[in-house]
Each structure stands twice: as C-alpha cells, then as structure tokens.
Image (cartoon, rainbow, N blue to C red):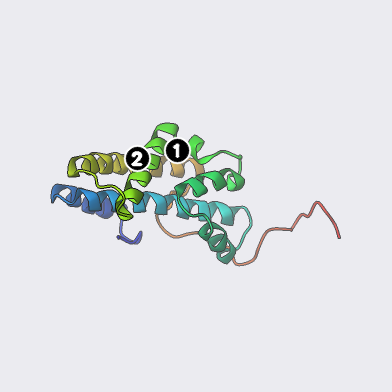
Amino acid sequence: MYPLRLPYQKLRSRLKRLLADGYAAEALVTSMFTAERLLRRTLIQLVISAGFTNGRAFQVVSRFNGIAAVKDAWSLYDRHGRGLVEVIGNANWKVLQGAAKMRNEMVHGSVTYSQKKCKSRAIEVISVIDAMKDKLHKAYGYHGWGGLKKRIVSALHTDPKVTM
C-alpha cells in the first residue's frame, strides 16, 4: 500500500502503472484502500473540528470498521448534519460500495474476478477518488490528503447546556 505522504499525482500515476502492467486486482485493492483512507482522514478532521482532541478523534474513528460505518457516522460530525452520500454524491458512493464489496470478496478468497472486471472497477474508483477529493475540499477545505490540523486541548464542554 502507498502512504498518503506521496503527492497525489504520484500515487495516481502508480495506480495507472499497476493497471498498465496488468495488475488490475492489485490496482483495485490499492485504489479502494486509498479511497477509504481519504474518507477516514477527512472524518478524523471533522471529529477534530467538532471539538475533540487529535487522540480522541483517532480513537473515535478507529471504531468504525468499513466504509459503511464511516458513512453512518459522517452526519454526526458534519457541521451541517450532511451525510457522506450527500457530500460526495450518490453515484460516487455506489461505485465505492460496489468496489468495497468486490475487494472484500477477493481478499477473503470467496470470489475471484476477471482481470477485465477488476480493471474496469479500478478505473471507476480512481475517477471517484479524483471527484471525491475535489468535493471534500469544496465542502470542508480539507480532502484527506496532507496533514491534519491539530487540537491538543478539547473544545468540548466549553459551553455546557447542563450544569452540575
């Protein structure tokens, strides 16, 4: 897997090279990993923006297993209560959902897919990553690529509604 420390264009060219060299299944797994990583990192930033410290934000997001769990938790931390599908678009979500299912079946060995099917799905995921990166940046000013803004001291409970 490629770390998110790589510049985005370099990672994109590596994914394209995997496809060109005939490693479509690996390209699918890596592109899905990248898409999930972008979503998780953006969700971490949303949790930090909601007032949690960095450490707590990582703890919160680490409990969400799979992209479905990330999707379910998204509206809890979005400032305007929007869901993930609303932010990235239903068509993009459907591609990610299908690719995640396909990736999981391949990784667990329950189903094998042809190189042609893997290649077409990987190309779709790469285009979704491009679109998702732009949509997340437009919505939040952060798209999961690059460093997180840090919060050392919690901003929660600074204006409590219930006094003790």
Residue furthest out toward the top: 91
Residue at (60, 67) in percent of width and height: 152
- Residue 109 lies, in percent from the top left, at 29, 54
Q: What amino acid type should be assigned to the residue bearing mark 1?
A: Ile
Q: Is residue 157 left or right of residue 112?
A: right
Give 97 or 42, whichever is nearer the viewer: 97
Residue depicted at x 40% and y 51%: 36
Image disc number at residue 128 = 2
> In the figure, is residue 162 to the left or right of 152?
right
Instruction: Tell whether label 2 touches label 1 (CB within 8 Å).
Output: yes
Q: Residue shown at 35%/59% (left/top)?
A: 4
Mark 1 or 2, nearer chain start: 1
Q: Secondary structure at mark 2?
A: helix
Q: Residues within 10 Å of mark 2 (few under 14, many from 20)?
A: many
Give the crowd class for mark 1: few <14, some 14-19, many >=20 residues within 10 Å: some
The residue beneath circle 1 is: 88
Q: Quadrant of residue 129?
A: top left
In the image, is residue 134 above or below residue 29? Answer: above
Please state if 5 lies on the left or on the right of 71 as rendered.
Answer: left
Residue 56 pos. (x, y %)? 59, 63
Quadrant into which the N terminus falls: bottom left
